[in-house]
Image: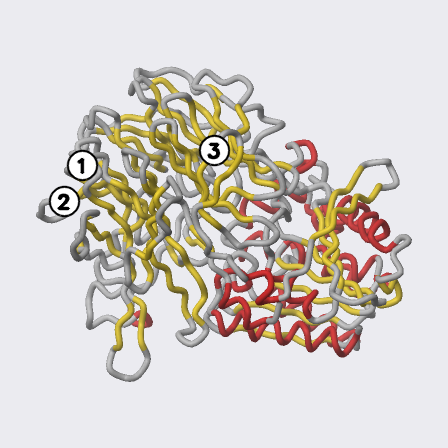
Amino acid sequence: MKATDISALRVPGTPTLSPDARAAVVSLAHPDLDADDYTAHLWLAPTDGVAPPRRLTHGWRDTEPTWSPDGRWVAFVRAERTDNGNGAPKTGKPQLWLMPVDGGEPRRLTDHPLGVTAPAWSPDSSRVAYTARVPEEGRYGTDTKVTPDAEPPRRITTMRYRLDGVGFTRDRPNHIWVVHTDGGEPVRVTGGDADHAAASWSPDGQWLTFVATRHDTAGDDLRVDVWVCRPDGTRLRALTDGGLSAGQPTFTPDGQAVCFTATPLGPDNRAAVCRNNGLWSVPMAGGAPTRLTDQERFTLANPGGMVEMTADGVLFTNEHRGAVQLLRVPFDGGEPEVLVDGERQVLGAAAAGATVVVSVGDPERPGELAVLDGGGLRVLTSFGDGFADQVGLRPMTGVTGTAPDGYPVPGWVVRPAGDGPHPVLLMIHGGPFTQYGWRVFDEAQVYAGAGYAVVMGNPRGSSGYGESHGRAVIGNVGEVSATDLLALLDAALAGDPSLDAGRVGVLGGSHGGFMTTWLAAHHGARFRAAISERAVNAIDSFTGSSDIGWFFADDLYGPDLGQQAAQSPLNHVDKIDIPMLIIHSEQDWRCPVEQAQRLFVALKHRGTPVEMLLFPGEGHELSRAGKPRHRVARFEAILDWWSRYL
């Protein structure tokens, strides 16, 4: 796979099913290098598989489809791309659109200055609820005479006031809205300066449930509660009362309870790092919430994990040893039924009656739409036909290392073509509470396509192997993670003549960048060079400069400042001798650019060969969601670095 082959990636989103289960609609997205943007269209696939799928829309970026309960309409979110007259087309804010299923042109229902997300139909198909940010007057273009640099100053009083990839949030809170499909202006349901999200209707259409941060200490903790109100905003009340960071609330079919996802919080309503995000239920009439999934074993897939209500239980996408399973969880808890398993990842699911459709990816295809059929999957689409041959996809081979204490460290090797010996890259994921897994991963494939063997795995600290596996690094992140990562590397190198143990590089982003810098300092003799990207390098400044640093640093590294200093890679820079490339984005608010700058200057003072590559206009998600041309430029810079030192 070459860097420019990212344009061949076709990834489906969460599907929606017609009420009669005869057809599914899904958004299919891909990077467009010519436009330097992302485009997406809706596709319709009959679930019987007799007729081929067909493209349903022709907008620029059409996403989040949802079928109306009466079967007549598909609501979706569209971002239009227009030419502003200077030869530089611009993609607008996403708005809610409505399309008749039996034919005809879609029509726009909203015109919010900052766009909309998460449409949800009322049971009678007359209204759609959704979420939209409400900008403070005079900001974000609400006054055409006030440019961004001329806006008034922001008075900050809470620790949570901005978000990477979004920007400042306290002056544009999320609110729930409802719009009638037969016309009329959208009606705002919620008020105040709190954030609200993820609206869902009760089966009788008399209530909305959503999550919100309406408590007094919002902004200084991680608490998110489940709320309900009438569709006109009256009779507002909370169903939970702290202790959880909740999301995705959905009424049970009888309307007597609300199921939702949540991570339990500590006594101060923080301490959520490396915790499994499970499924919960709370009675509509009031009462304590109950966890339906085992805290140790099950966690919602991240990113993009979702739940879906069925008559027999709740569909739940669960991370499991590099896979993402689809589970059906009973309403009263207990052992879930595994609907989809194996060496694949479920990207989204929808159900109607006894029919369940999924978007699913695996190591050979970025994603297809499939229907559950007799315990297996019957694929409905051919989005990835020819992809493996077109890009020269390389297989993933499982490998397990053994740490000195006997602990198993799971992972994979992606080998390039040919006999070798190949130079080797130890690639480390972020988080740390995330997982590499059974999916086409452009990073590993591009490096393997250029002749490098990629070793990647899920050491302690990762998700998908039980909560205790994730929490094993708390308070000693660098040492515990390094032990596992080196054990995995040793296992991959052992007895494999196709891998050159004398030419090994190390790279990673975010937490992976933290570990890259740590390994360069403490185990530099194992590597010829390193690439540290969007990293946490200095915990002290990260605490105050990151959008999450105010809670994340104490939770992961421990609250003791001496302990944090000992874990900061920057404080061990005097031991880094191997060449290092530092990659960062100028608008990264998760690991702000000062983290890169401090490391760069320290290495320059030391005389260590070092370069810094800064991307303008990008945030923390550059490698996954940055401008397509920037993603290609990043790949080219990485391959150039390895060509010089490996």
**Viewer-proximal residue among 174 and 15:** 15
Q: Quadrant of the C terminus?
A: bottom right
Residue 311 horizontal/vertical position (percent): 36, 22
Q: Give the residue furthest to the front.
A: 50
Name the kind of residue labelled 2 in the image: Thr
Q: Do callouts 3 and 2 mark residues in contact (Cβ within 8 Å)?
A: no
Residue 460 horizontal/vertical position (percent): 72, 41
Residue 149 horizontal/vertical position (percent): 33, 72
Q: Is residue 218 above or below residue 236?
A: below
Q: Which residue is mark 1?
A: 125
Name the kind of residue labelled 1 in the image: Ser
Q: Residue at x 69, y 55 (%)?
A: 395
Query: Would you say 237 lies left or right of 243 here?
Result: left
Q: Is residue 345 above or below residue 236?
A: below
**Viewer-proximal residue among 208 and 89:** 89
**Viewer-proximal residue among 400 and 72:** 72
Q: Earlier in the sequence, mark 3 or mark 2?
A: 2
Residue 243 horizontal/vertical position (percent): 47, 28
Front disc: 3 or 1: 3
Q: Quadrant of the N terminus?
A: bottom right
